[in-house]
Image (tube, rainbow, N blue to C red):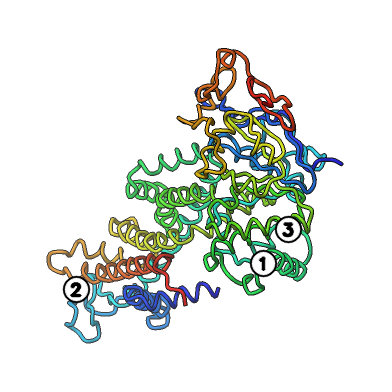
Amino acid sequence: MNPVLRTEALELHHATARGALRAVDGITLEIAKGETLGLVGESGCGKSTLARCIVGIQNPTGGTLSIEGVHPGTSRATRLERARNVQMIFQDPWGALNPRLSVERIITEPLQVAGIGTRAERRAAALAIAQKVGLSPYHLERLPHELSGGQRQRVSIARALVLNPNLLVCDEAVSALDVSVQAQVLNLLLDLQKELGLSYLFISHDLAVVRYIANRIAVMYLGRIVEIGPAEDVWIHRLHPYTQALINAIPDEAARQDDAPILEGDVPSPVNPPSGCPFRTRCPIARTECAESRPELRRVGTHEVACHFADAG
Amino acid sequence: MRGALSLLGRLARHPSGLIGMVLILAIVAMSALAGILYPDGPWTMAGPPRLWPGADPRFPLGTDTFGRDLIPALFYGARVSLLVGVSAAGAALVIGTVVGAIAGYWGGWVDDALMRLTDAFQTVPNFLLSIAIVGIIGASLPVITFAIAIVAWPMIARLVRADVLRLRTYDFVQSCKIIGMSDLRIVFQQILPNCLAPIIVTASVLVANSIIVEASLAFLGLGDPNVMSWGTVLNIGRQELRNGWYLTAVPAVALVLTVMSLNLIGDALNDVLNPRLKERK
């Protein structure tokens, strides 16, 4: 079966005065139908930029992107076409809804822009989708500021789902919510996935959340994927020193491995990344080879890792 | 429509908003009734010249150097002041909003070009530019309105641009792009309604400002010679300042009250439209 999303060597370089800023630097990945790919990494590693390329807010400068086997262009018609396949949920539930529009208007807007249905049909669609995401009919009359954070996020989800997309990009979709509300929204996403056969690209800096919801995990560093594989495998047999450090940074004793490194310093500048392995400047096991050649993703056991010295042992 | 009515209602419950609205309604009534109460127009010589206010019960506010009654002059002057004030402010608002929204949303060289143009207008002293335009093209109401609007729009443009710059990064705008909404619709339907509050507040100040500029031009003798404006009376009074200061004082009081009422409304709008102060019913 064709994957819902496939990227190959996807690149987004911004031209800056000091040279190219490599926000996304050669990402190759696939998401199958009904699958959730969790994408983790520190802020500034290019997660959100990748998401913006996939939904079409930004145009990649290199590589290929295909959604349902189609390479989306940039014209208005292909934007509308892409909108029916990919939608996005944002982090900040307060900024993601136009404060002056009613919830019904917010949910029906994608249909209206796509020219689908009459007013009454769109209203019926809004009612149906609102029910699916756990909103009551009276919520449709409300303005966003009359809703709680969790309810707003449900409105965002309803708006994203009203066009029946196959892929939902969730950019830190639960990070701004209270922990109890987080769990509700995560479970809603899981239920909707089961019911509608959705695929998710679930972006988060919160590894515990990603482990809970994702089938596979991809770890991103400085615009590249450094480790990717089945979720539990990556969690338990983490091979890349960066993955080890990330998981070790979770304040939870059970997850910690005593010999794992603690991350120090900041992500290097993507304008002038380190030679060889981009992680070597913060890596505890870096050797001279790491500065000379860049490790490519290679298969180790059940997953793939980009490190010269990571092995199944 | 319902929103505009509820805005008026909230304005009426605000103390300075109420005073401002009563005053401005009185001035609107004056200009509406001018033709009915004084069908002869403001130019007729009705009595002896240089009559002080109160000297003759037929002319409670006195007469000017040509024996023209000052009350019709005030009534007809209100017409000109409001007409020029509202239309100049309206034109400035439209130009400024469009320029600011385009510059803020599209950014890049479009923004650079439009903002340099705005800078160019702002570096020239406003009133001098207005005088120059009226002086060169000629004094008629459309030219005066144009001369006022052309110097007022840069302020609106900067205001709108700043707000659009802030709003365009919001996720709801990104979401509209994702669903394939056209840029024009995003700017005018999604973003602009969200920066309406500062625009409305500035508009009331802009009307007041335009009225002052019009009166100043007329005071300098650059008013439309075919219409009686408060500035026209001021211009006549200037020559009589030593022995007939009431000729200056009467239209000046009318101007002060009008401008003050608009500023009061502006203040009230600022409070009423501020969402942090807004009480929900």
Residue type marked 1: Gly
Left or right of residue A228, residue B117 in this image: left
Query: Residue B16, how many percent across, how many down?
Result: 32, 73
Q: Is residue A293 visible?
A: yes
- Other-residue count near label 1 (Cα within 10 Å), few / some / many at <14 / 14–19 / ≥20: some
Identified by mark 2, the residue type is Arg
Mark 2 and mark 3 on one chain:
no
Q: Residue B83 lies in what quarter of the image? A: bottom left
What element does badge 3 sit on?
helix
Residue, disc 2: B50
Q: Nearer the viewer, mark 2 or mark 3?
A: 3
For badge 3, the amino acid type reads Leu
Lateral position of residue B15 relative to residue A204, left or right: left
Secondary element under disc 2, as helix, strand or loop, is loop
Distance Cα–Cα, label 2 vs label 3:
86 Å
Disc 3 designates what residue? A192
What percent of the width, then of the height, locates residue B117? 45, 40
